[in-house]
Every structure is written in structure tokens, then in C-alpha cells.
Image (spheres, rainbow, N blue to C red):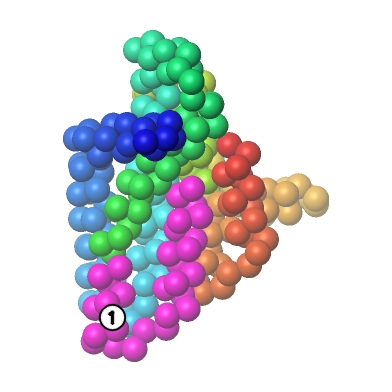
Amino acid sequence: MTAFGYLLGKELRGVFLQPIAWVLMAVFLLVMGYTFATGLALTKTAALSRVVFQAATLLLLLIPLVTMRLLAEEQRHGTLEMLLATPVREPHIVLAKFVASMALVVAMLAPTVAYAVVLAIFGQPEWGPIYSGYVGLLLLASFLSAMGLALSALTSNQVVAATLALGLSLLLWMIDTLSAVLPAPWDELFLHVSLLARFTPFATGAMYLSDAGFFISGTLFA
């Protein structure tokens, strides 16, 4: 087994063997199931845009709880220095932790594909917004996971790491509201860094390279 494979296996076990992972998955799927059922009953439309927006909001709240321990816990227990002393490359350590956190996000999102199956059986949904919605969710999750991982490296306290990640995530999600009261060119600047403004086209069935590039470049930078 390669060094990266060993690290990835270690991180996957660390994520999925924690009770909090299964609690987060249960809460996510419970809220998503309720959102889908009530939305379908009220609107009678074969669309998942409401579900996609709800999933994005939950990811903003839950991903900081996933990433808070990735490096903060290593620093608190003093195992990060030991890990860095082994013959593994630092990018492999970071990538393994990032992939492990994304694996949990994928595990949370995967069961929601059943909603699209239900719509296909009992209706005629537009598949474009469904496909783009899930692409947008994965891009948003990768951005939030990378940012949470970076903030987890700044402290040995998991609560502080989670609070910083949650606060910054919510700020970037809502920052487009400032564009309405700021003069040019600041209004455009705040609009361009808004997670909500960048995610909305995906949820409504449109995919732009500029929005995908924003999430990808933000992930790589973090």
C-alpha cells in the first residue's frame, strides 16, 4: 500500500468511525426527507430546486463540524509532529484529509438521489437542474471542506475551528446583500465572492465556467 493509500484509509476510518459522522448523516437525511416530502405535497411539481437549496444550507452548517477535527485534533494530541516526521509528503496529508471529508459529504448526498428516482417514476422532471444542482453541491462542498481544513490548521481547539469555519461560511453565503448598499466597484466585488450568488445558477439549471472556476480555485487556494 502506498503512503497516500495508508493515510487515506486512516482518515476514512477516523471520519466514519466517529459517532458524530453518523449523527450528521442522520440529521441531514431527516431534514432532506422532510423538505422533499413537504415540497412535493405543497407544489405538486417534479423539481428538486428547493431540495438543492436546502442541502446547500445544511452543508454550510454541517461541514464545519466534519472538518473541525481534521488538523486541530492532530495538534491537540501532538500527533501532527509525529506524522510530519514520517516519510510522507505534506500534500498527501492534506489531500487525504480533504478526500475523507468529501467522502462523508458524498455519503450524505448519495441517498438523496432517490428523490430524483421518485420524481422520474411518478412524473416527468427536468433533468438539467437536477444534474447541475448536484454538481453545484459537490463544488460548494469541496470549497467548504477545503476552507474548514485550512482553518482547522490554525488552532488546536476543535470548537474554535468549527466556529471560524461556520462564521466564514455564513458570511460568504450572505455577503451579496452588501452589494445593494455599496457603491461601484465594491458592489460587484462582493457579489462575485458570494457563495449564494455563485451557487444559485447551478440550483436553477445553469452551469457557468466562471462559477465552477470560482469554487475550484477557492478550493485549491484553501
Residue 22, placed above or below residue 194: above
Q: Is residue 151 magenta?
A: no
User: 195 or 180, which lies in front?
Assistant: 195
Write the start and end of the magenta stretch as one range.
113-142
Within-10-Å neighbours for mark 1: few <14, some 14–19, many 20+: some
On the rendered image, what quadrant is the N terminus found in?
top left
**Looking at this rendering, what residue extends furthest in the front direction?**
1
Residue 123, placed above or below residue 34: below
Name the quadrant containing residue 69. top left
- Using residue 221 as the reference point, say whether residue 51 is left or right of it: left
Residue 184 x %, y %? 80, 52
* Amino acid type shown at disc 1: Leu
User: 155 or 47, which lies in front?
Assistant: 155
Residue 59 x %, y %? 39, 49
On the rendered image, what quadrant is the C terminus found in?
top right
- Using residue 182 as the reference point, say whether residue 18 is left or right of it: left
**Circle 1 residue:** 119
Instruction: Tell me the element at label 1.
Output: helix
Residue 207, placed above or below residue 163: below
Residue 89, placed above or below residue 121: above
Residue at (52% x, 46% y) in the render? 143
Residue 11 x %, y %? 34, 33
Residue at (24% x, 48% y) in the render? 25
Residue at (37% x, 40% y) in the render? 100
